[in-house]
Amino acid sequence: MPKRKRTLHALSQRTVVTKAAALRLPILDSYLLREFVAPFLFMFFAFYIFWALNIFFVAADYEINHHAPFFLVLRFVLFRVPQATPMAFPFATLFAGLFAMSRLAGDNEVTAMRTSGVPLWRFALTPVLFSVAMFGICYLMNEYIAPRAVDISTRSFYQIVYNTESLPVESQFFRKDSDTQNVFYVNQVAPDHKTMVGVQIFRPAHDNNYWSETIQAKTATVAGPMLVLHDAVVTRYNNDGFTTAQDRSKELSIGLPMGENVAQFLSSENDDPWTMSSKTLATQVKSLQTQGVGGEALGNLQVNLAGKLAWPFGCVIAMLLAVPLAIRYGRRGRFLGAALAIFAFFVYLLMYSAAAALGRNGAINPYLAAWLPNAIMGVTGVTLFWAEEHG
C-alpha cells in the first residue's frame, strides 16, 4: 500500500476511534449505571410478578369453583398486570437508588470519590438522569400500553362471568350501571347458584326524577351474554310518575351489562379510569364540566388525569429521596436500603390515598391532590441532599 494511502487509512481509523470514544459514557457514569440496572430490573419484575400472583389468586376462584375456561382466566391475569406500571417504575427506581447507593456508601466508595474531589451533585447526576429516563418510559407505557391491556383484561373478566356455572351475585344485590344509570336489584339467589329470584330493573327518565320504566321478574338466569327474565312485568310511566302501560312476558331477554347487547358492549370503551389515556380522561372531564356535573364523579376523573403524569414522575422524586438517604444511612448495610425503600413507598401510597380522597370530595384542588405527595417527598429529598452536601 502506498505511503499516502496508509496515512489516510490510519487517519480514518483514528477518527472512528475518536468518535466511538466521544459516544462512550464517562467511567464514573458507566460504573454507577451498572450498579443501578440490576437492582432496578430485579425489583421491577418482582413487583410485576407479585401483582400478577395477587390477581391470579382472586381469579382462581372462578377457575376452581366456577369452572371458568383456564385460558380466559390467564388472559384476564396477564393483561391486568400492566395496571401496575405507574407503581412498579417508581418503586423499582427507589429500590435501585437505595440499594445501589447503600452498597457504594457501605464500601466507602462514596467517601473515596468525594475525597478525590468529585462533588456530591456530580455523583448524583447519573442516578437522577437514570430516573428521568425511567419517568419517560413509565409515562409512555402508562399512556399507551396499560390502558389497552387493562381494557382487554376487563372484557375478559366479563367473558369469565358469562362462562361461569355460578353467578357472582349475592342476595340483596344492588348494582347501578354507570352508562345507562339503570338500577339492578336481586332479592335472592336460588340454591343452584344460577337462578336469581325477585329481579327488578329500574330505568330512569332523563328529564325528571321519576322512573321511565321498571321491569319485574319472578326469576332470571344468565344465558351466555344475555340476562333472561322469566314471568316479567314491564311497567312504563309518564313524566308525572303515573303508569301509562303495562305488559307481561313469559320470557324477556336483555343484554349484559344492562342496556347493552354483546356487540355494543364489546365495541364500546370501558369507563374504568385505568383503561383511559390522558386524552380520553381530559375529554371526560370537559364533558362533565360542560354539563355542569361536579362532585365526586368529576373530582375522581380529575385526580386520575393528574395522576397520569404525577405517578410516573414519582421515579424522579424517588431518586431525589434515595440518594441522600442511602449516603447517610448506607454504611449500616445495603439491606437497610431495601427496608427504607419499602417504608418510603408505603408512606407515599398513604399520602397519595389521603390526598386523592381530599381531591375527589373537593376539599382541595384535585390536580394539587395528585401532585402533593410528589411535592412533599421532593422537598424532603432536596433538603436531605442539601444537608448532606453542606453538612
Image (cartoon, helix red, strand yellow):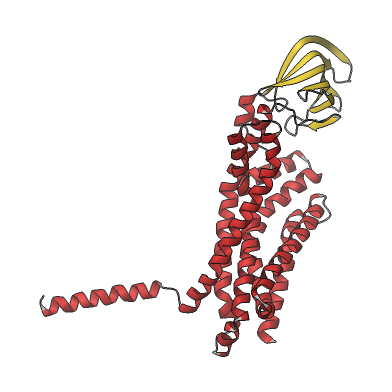
User: 275 or 209, which is in the foreground?
Assistant: 275
Q: Position of residue 23 (x, y in %)?
A: 40, 72
User: 338 or 184, which is in the foreground?
Assistant: 338
Classify 30 as above or below 109: above
Name the quarter where the C terminus is drawn: bottom right
Q: Position of residue 134 (x, y in %)?
A: 57, 62
- Residue at 30 percent of width and 72 percent of height: 16
Residue 45 is drawn in which quadrant?
bottom right
For the view shown, which residue lies furthest in the front direction? 64
Residue 3 is drawn in which quadrant?
bottom left
- Residue at 80 percent of width and 9 percent of height: 248
Classify 54 as above or below 352: above
For the view shown, which residue lies furthest in the left direction? 2
Q: Position of residue 199 (x, y in %)?
A: 82, 21
User: 60 or 4, which is in the foreground?
Assistant: 60
Q: Position of residue 173 (x, y in %)?
A: 83, 30
Residue 307 visible here: yes
Number of marks in picture: 0
- Residue at 82 percent of width and 51 percent of height: 362
Residue 316 visible here: no
Residue 364 shown left or right of residue 56 in the figure: right
Classify 174 as above or below 223: below
Residue 269 is drawn in which quadrant?
top right
- Residue at 66 percent of width and 37 percent of height: 270
